[in-house]
């Protein structure tokens, strides 16, 4: 194993494990996780790993991404944010492991370690930092999250931007891939359809699903060419969940009559609100010659690779 050395958080997850699979021959990865003895919510835990590493880059993927789970943390986090004693505040977050603890405090610890040990940081964020009102979001648009998950990820972004060194904020959306132990939204829908289960899909939410292999190859290019700043690594097709499910039935030869329509208001009742029009543009990376596949193209590729 040779090449560029990278410290990574979340390298065993949906995106992270694919990064290691596809780039493992040209990069050397060190995974920071609870399994390897690192708790990103504890500053000393992070610093102990960084001080013994000569890695040039850090990729920070670890996050609490369950949108509804994050929303349940909101009131608890708001209460903790009222504490006047910072030490007590952080000790409570470390104990509770809320969305703010992982997505904000954890990111703060990673950023401070990067400052101390002069490492370049890659922070993976989300299109949920936008409110979904105007649509067609570019990297220059100001975020305005409408749920707690988006809020905590945006707070993480702001902490990353405080780095005086070199950093990337890579926003992605609805990532999917072929084989993995945990189901993403594509393989979740697919498995239910294969069991002839009826599914109600939201028609008034627009997204740009991202084929993870494209994300990884774009990441490789950005690292090798040292291109920094905020970039949208998202798919090239704007589509509703309802339309995406119909494309899945078409690609895999399944029964489209199993798919019915529903609305955001109905589907997400008593849950975290989802933005409406998350048409996140990837013009900036397309301008670098990096082509992100459409959802239709991505489905054909995961079918070719095998989705089980």
Image (tube, grey):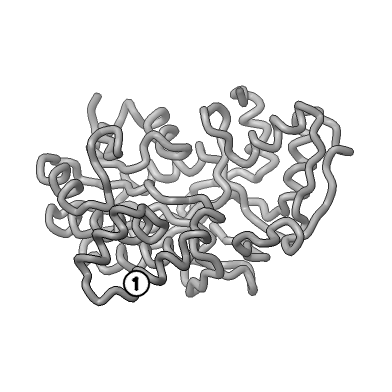
Q: Quadrant of residue 249?
A: top right
Q: Quadrant of the C terminus?
A: top right
Q: Residues within 10 Å of mark 1 (few under 14, many from 20)?
A: some
Vertical side of 133 occupied by 262: above or below: above
Tell me which residue sits at (19%, 59%) in the image: 112
> Which quarter of the figure has residue 15?
top left
Question: Which of these two is toward me, 282 or 34?
Answer: 34
Question: Viewer-proximal residue, 289 or 17?
Answer: 17
Looking at the picture, how far across and down is residue 215, in whole percent? Answer: 48, 44
Residue 256 relative to residue 39: left or right:
right
Q: Quadrant of the N terminus?
A: top left
Q: In the image, residue 234 lies at what x, y percent?
A: 54, 52
Q: For this rendering, which residue is in front, 250 or 276?
A: 276
Q: Secondary structure at mark 1?
A: helix
Relative to 74, say whether 192 is above or below: above
Check the image and report above or below for 280 versus 201. below
Q: Position of residue 62 (x, y in %)?
A: 37, 47
- In-image side of 201 versus 103 (left or right): right
Give me the residue at 21% from left, 73% from top. Answer: 85
Residue 294: quarter of image: top right
Q: Which residue is at the far right? A: 257
- How many numbered discs, if any? 1
Between 227 and 261, the one lying in front of the other is 261
Residue occupying image coordinates x 66% and y 65%: 277
Task: Find disc 1 in the rendering and name its residue.
Answer: 81
x%, y% of residue 19?
40, 35
């Amino acid at each position: 194993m040779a090449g560029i050395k990278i410290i990574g958080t979340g390298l065993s997850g949906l995106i992270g494990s694919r990064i290691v699979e596809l780039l493992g021959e040209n990069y050397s990865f060190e995974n920071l996780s609870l399994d390897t003895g690192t708790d990103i919510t504890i500053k000393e835990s992070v610093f102990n790993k960084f001080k013994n590493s000569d890695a040039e880059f850090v990729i920070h993927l670890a996050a609490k991404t369950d949108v509804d789970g994050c929303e349940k943390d909101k009131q608890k986090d708001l209460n903790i944010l009222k504490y006047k004693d910072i030490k007590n505040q952080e000790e409570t977050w470390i104990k509770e492991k809320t969305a703010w603890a992982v997505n904000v405090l954890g990111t703060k610890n990673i950023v401070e370690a990067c400052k101390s040990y002069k490492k370049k940081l890659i922070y993976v964020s989300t299109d949920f930092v936008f409110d979904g009102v105007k649509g067609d979001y570019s990297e220059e648009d100001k975020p305005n999250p409408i749920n707690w998950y988006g809020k905590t990820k945006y707070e993480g972004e702001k902490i990353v931007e405080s780095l005086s060194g070199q950093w990337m904020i890579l926003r992605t959306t609805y990532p999917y891939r072929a084989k993995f132990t945990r189901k993403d939204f594509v393989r979740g829908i697919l498995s239910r359809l294969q069991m002839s289960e009826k599914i109600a899909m939201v028609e008034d939410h627009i997204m740009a699903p991202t084929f993870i292999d494209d994300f990884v190859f774009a990441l490789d290019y950005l690292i090798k060419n040292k291109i920094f700043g905020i970039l949208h690594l998202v798919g090239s097709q704007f589509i509703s969940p309802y339309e995406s499910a119909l494309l899945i039935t078409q690609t895999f030869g399944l029964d489209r009559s199993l798919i019915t329509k529903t609305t955001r208001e109905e589907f997400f009742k008593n849950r975290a609100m989802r933005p409406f029009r998350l048409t996140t543009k990837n013009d900036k990376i397309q301008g670098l010659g990096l082509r992100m596949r459409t959802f239709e193209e991505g489905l054909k590729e995961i079918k070719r690779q095998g989705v089980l």
